[in-house]
Amino acid sequence: DGKGDNQNTAIPYARGTYVQCIDANQGAYFEQMLLLPCVLAEFRSRRPGDGGGKKIIGFPEHITSDFGSIGDFAASAELAFGTILQRAYCLLGARMHYGHPDIMNKEFMMQQGGVSKATKTLNLSEDIFAGMDFVLRGGGRTIKHREYFHLAKGRDLGFNTVLAFFSKLSSGAGEQLLTRQTMRLGQLLPLPEFLSFYYAHMGHYLTQWAVSWGLPVLTIVWLLILLNGCEDLNDVSIKCIVGGQSAASVMAEAWQYIYSGNLLIVFLVAQMAPVFFETWMQDGIVMSLTRLVKQILTLSPIMFIFQAKVIGFYTMNELKYGGASYVATGRGLPTERRPFIGAIGEGGELIPGGLYLDYARLTYYDGACLLVLIILVSVAGGMEHTGPQLVGIIVSLGLVTISWLLAPFVFNPYQFRPYCWMMDLKAWVRFFLEDGGKHWKKWYMQDQLKPRRGFRATVLEFGFFIELFWVLCCFASLNARTALLCQVSTAWRVWYWLLLMP
């Protein structure tokens, strides 16, 4: 399928013993080619049959597309992943083959079926399966990482193209969890190597989903505890201690420990540490600090919070429904503006397609729900008389809500230009009102009402457990009110219908 099939078909016809499969957006340097004898010496055997040639030698990439805020963010992430993280993964035994600069022994690759897996949908991340199969075959095979040799690499520069690239990686990671290679590595690898393998690959994507869903779930729990507090002492259905601590103060103390300012600082430092130290080693402390401050001032936390949400969505969507496919990012210029909901063509017709349609299911709906939860918590008295204890959770909620709702507009070129804004407004009106809303109906039927796959897929939805919990709460509340009415009135059957109201 695509690139994987092309590579495997060409391998038998390649000259020489060692192969390197690079992408079309990569380039080489003459000075680096002078180091090829050193690269080939990595495969040298000390004696016949010792397995010295059974290797995959990995190399980093020199990212040349580090201009513009989004391009700089993507280049920084690639810099950390291709250098300092790969050195750690290689030491821990978790490095696999990520394609591109890696050089492999052609003969051993042909023995395991090629340099890529090419099954459509299942092997969307085709490169890594060469490393997984290589490790599973054993027999002295090793995967190493060296940094004296590299190739040029041009990454995505625009907001939408970067997220499209990560959507492809996330869907590929979701499919990796379903493969026999992952299952066999989990059974055969020693525990330290397996934990490193999990953290370096699918564990990262599952963690992004857990982090993205963690804050809304905690906010729901916060609201439920506030609504079940002991402030109303006349409610005999709730057993409360007179003079006890209020629910708002209890939650404020909990948030003070869970989302303390020191913990947030440590978390931010840990996230930025790989790029900071790698830049320090390569370019010096001044350049490292300058790059760090520049990225913070250009709202990199907003970008990476949004990116984590997209990664988590596509990973879990792939596990639940499948259907991964290759995403052609295009790698266009970062100056191209994406409309809000559609563009008006030369003939006056509406061409749907824009930021709202791209990210409604991914982040906008969840961001709006989180904003409503924050308002309900405030109305329920969760922020009264708490002092500075809620600073950490408020900052976290604010960053996540702003990122999920506004990040596409913040990083969209010419977003707030008056002419562009007026065109977006016209397209928005036509999208919802033209011909009885035919554009909206078509989009909603195709993208929002996707057919599910029975009860097995339904129970995997987080909303299913929320709805089930809501039903249980309604039954518990009904029982409590029934018991209360039976105590205060003998004619409770006459008024029982009032108890059925939620």
Image (cartoon, grey):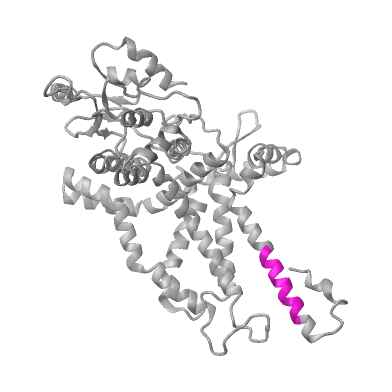
Query: Please, which residue is most extreme toward the left here?
Result: 46
- Label total for image: 0
Determine whether, in the image, residue 476 is placed left or right of residue 358.
right
Residue 372's x, y, as percent?
Answer: 59, 62
- At 85% from the left and 84% from the top, the residue drawn is 490
- At 72% from the left and 40% from the top, the residue drawn is 434
Does 288 appear above or below 450? below
**478 part of magenta stretch:** yes
Q: In which image quadrant can residue 484 be found? A: bottom right
- At 38% from the left and 20% from the top, the residue drawn is 113
Does 277 appear above or below 447? below
Characterize the magenta stretch by its predominant secondary structure.
helix
The answer to whether one can see residue 335 in this image is: no
Which of 191/202 is in front?
A: 191
Quadrant of the frame with the C terminus: bottom right
Determine whether, in the image, residue 125 is placed left or right of residue 139.
right
Residue 167's x, y, as percent?
Answer: 47, 38
Residue 73's x, y, as percent?
Answer: 34, 44
Determine whether, in the image, residue 247 is placed left or right of residue 97.
right
Q: Which residues are magenta?
A: 472-484
Which of 207/439 is in front?
A: 207
Residue 179's x, y, as percent?
Answer: 46, 33
Which of 125/384 is in front?
A: 125
**208 part of magenta stretch:** no
Q: In which image quadrant can residue 450 be found? A: top right
The answer to whether one can see residue 124 in this image is: yes
Query: Please, which residue is most extreme toward the bottom here?
Result: 243
